[in-house]
Amino acid sequence: MAAIDFPNAPTSGDVFVAAGKTWVYNGTSWALRNVFIPDVVIATAQLADGAVTTVKIAAGAVTATKLDTAYAPIASPTLTGVPAAPTATAATNTTQLATTAFVRTEVANLVASSPASLDTLNELALALGSDASFSTTVTNSLSLKAPLDGPTFTGVPVAPTAAVGTNTTQLATTAFVIASGPSDTVLDGGTPTTLQFFVMGAVDAGILA
C-alpha cells in the first residue's frame, strides 16, 4: 500500500479522504474510520454518487439527532403544512394515499347527476323516511295492493259512481245500479211493464192479464 501523505498540523476531528478511505485525526494520530458525520449539515452536492454506502457507515454512526428534522420518518410520519401526493385514478382501491382531489372525484361520481335535493346521504335518508328497513316496508305495502290484471278485492271496495246512462267498461257501483233501475214512474208515460209492477210490489193478476 502506498504511503498516504496526511495534511500537516491537523487538529482533532479533522477528516481526510485518501485511497477511497476516510481518516479522522483524534488529536494524536490519524485513525481509519468507515465514515465520520460532523456536526454540520452536508449538502448532497458535496457527496459523490455512491460515495456513502452501508459498508462505510459504522453501526450507530447515524442517529436521529444527526438527521435533519425537516424530513419525516417512513414509519408513522406526522406531516405539517400542506402535504401533497399524486392523485390516484378514480375507483382506485388500494393503500395508496387519497388526496382531496381523489375524494371529490369519488363523491361526484357517487352523486352523478342527482338533483341538488338528493345529493347527500342525509337528503336520501329523509326521502326514504329515515327507514332502515325501507325495502321490507315497501314489500309489505305492495303485498296489500291488488294487481291491475284480474284483481280480487276484499272488504268493502268502493269506486267513483258513473253518471246514469253510462254504458262503458267503467265499474258500476251499487249507487249506479239503484239509480239506473226501474222506478214507480211509468216509463215515457206509457203502460206499466211487468217488471215495474214486480218492483213496486203492485202485482195484480187482472192487470197482468
Image (spheres, rainbow, N blue to C red):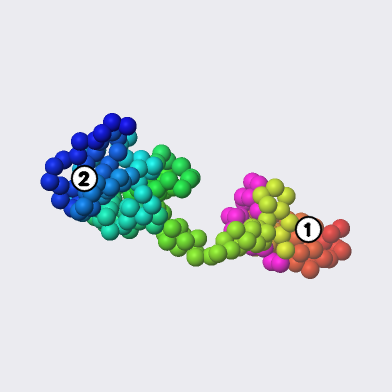
Q: Quadrant of the N terminus?
A: top left
Q: Which residues are magenta?
A: 155-172
Please state which amino acid type lies under the numbered disc 2.
Val
Report the front residue among 198 and 115: 115
Q: Would you say 206 lies left or right of 116 here?
A: right
Secondary structure beneath disc 2? strand
The CA span between labels 2 and 1 is 133 Å
Residues packed near mark 1 inside 10 Å, few (<14), some (14 to 19) or many (20 plus): few
Residue 146: which quarter of the image? bottom right
Residue 171: in magenta span: yes
Residue 50 rendering spot, x and y as whole percentages: 32, 35
The dot on residue 195 is 1
Residue 105: which quarter of the image? top left
In the image, is residue 186 above or below residue 149? Answer: below
Residue 36 rendering spot, x and y as whole percentages: 27, 48
Residue at x 27% of width, y 55% of height: 66
Q: Which residue is mark 2?
A: 15
Report the front residue among 100 and 109: 100
